[in-house]
Image (cartoon, rainbow, N blue to C red):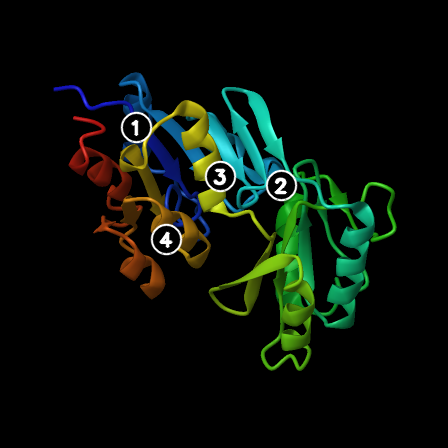
Amino acid sequence: MKKERCMLFFDIDGTLITTDGRRTFPESAKRALREARERGHLVYINTGRVMENVDDFIREVGFDGYVCGCGTYIVSEGEVMLHHRIPQERCREIAYKCRECHMMAIFEHTDHTGYDSALAGEDAGYQEILHYFKSMGRHMIDNIEDPEFCFDKFACWYEEGNPKLQEFIDYMSEDFTCIQREGNFLEVVPHGFSKATGIRFLMEKYDIPLERIYAFGDSNNDLDMLRYVQNSIAMGVCTEEVAEAASYRTDTVEQDGIEKAMRHFGMIE
């Protein structure tokens, strides 16, 4: 019996691809995603990355759309459905607060990536992150006062014991949510937006009930979507919080976890 049309949402890092530096996208996962679409299911990326940072080798597999920037930018069937914009002056205020509090930020916009050159030489790890973005050919803006400087959301790193960390979090809490990621790493997203709000937007657009929505993830920025849906799948390697939030736990990325879970739920044969 053919399964009714479902909507599937996939995180990228640690879910579709490995996080070991090789960034492997298993053939089994690609095959499963394509088969699900052939069977009429809607397949979406749901990521903290902004659209510019979704690599071509991921896009070329084929998706019905993308929920990017933790729900701040949504594309479906080639059309931009939603793009939440932060006023440029507010972006600059936040960037200067990052500088004051020694929060080493990557300011993410769907068209470019920003950073503060004043902090670029302070930390070897931050330099490595900047080098990665530059090596990928991203359009980089290093000046807060650049006419193009703006962002949809951002990520920031801080040194252990940073005395201004709580001050920064309190400052951001007025209009942003700070998600504590693994290590000394915050993901900062405007209030009212998350991977879960992206799912809700699309399920309402396509009139697909919650019981036919599936979400796959591994890290703490996936918690909102995993708690929102009834069918939540945690990868074999995931945070403790994700394991507790999910209704089903599959194998690792490398051990065909995506394909196994999709077969378990009847998306593919």
Image quadrant occupied by the C terminus: top left
Q: What residue sits 61% from the left and 50% below the top? A: 132
Vertical arrangement, residue 146 with respect to residue 157, above or below: above
How far is disc 1 from disc 2 in space, using C-alphas?
34 Å
How far is disc 2 from disc 3 in space, using C-alphas?
27 Å
The secondary element bearing badge 4 is classed as: loop
- Give left or right: position of 128 versus 32: right
Comes first in the chain, label 3 or label 1: 1
Q: Position of residue 94 (x, y in %)?
A: 75, 59
Give the label, 4 or 1, closer to the camera: 1
Comes first in the chain, label 1 or label 2: 1
Question: Which residue is identified by label 3?
Answer: 198
Question: Which residue is identified by label 1?
Answer: 6
Callout 1, which amino acid? Answer: Cys
Comes first in the chain, label 4 or label 3: 3
Question: Which residue is identified by label 4?
Answer: 218
Do the numbered discs 4 and 2 sit on residues whose CB atoms are within 8 Å?
no
How many numbered marks have been drawn onto this rendered protein structure? 4
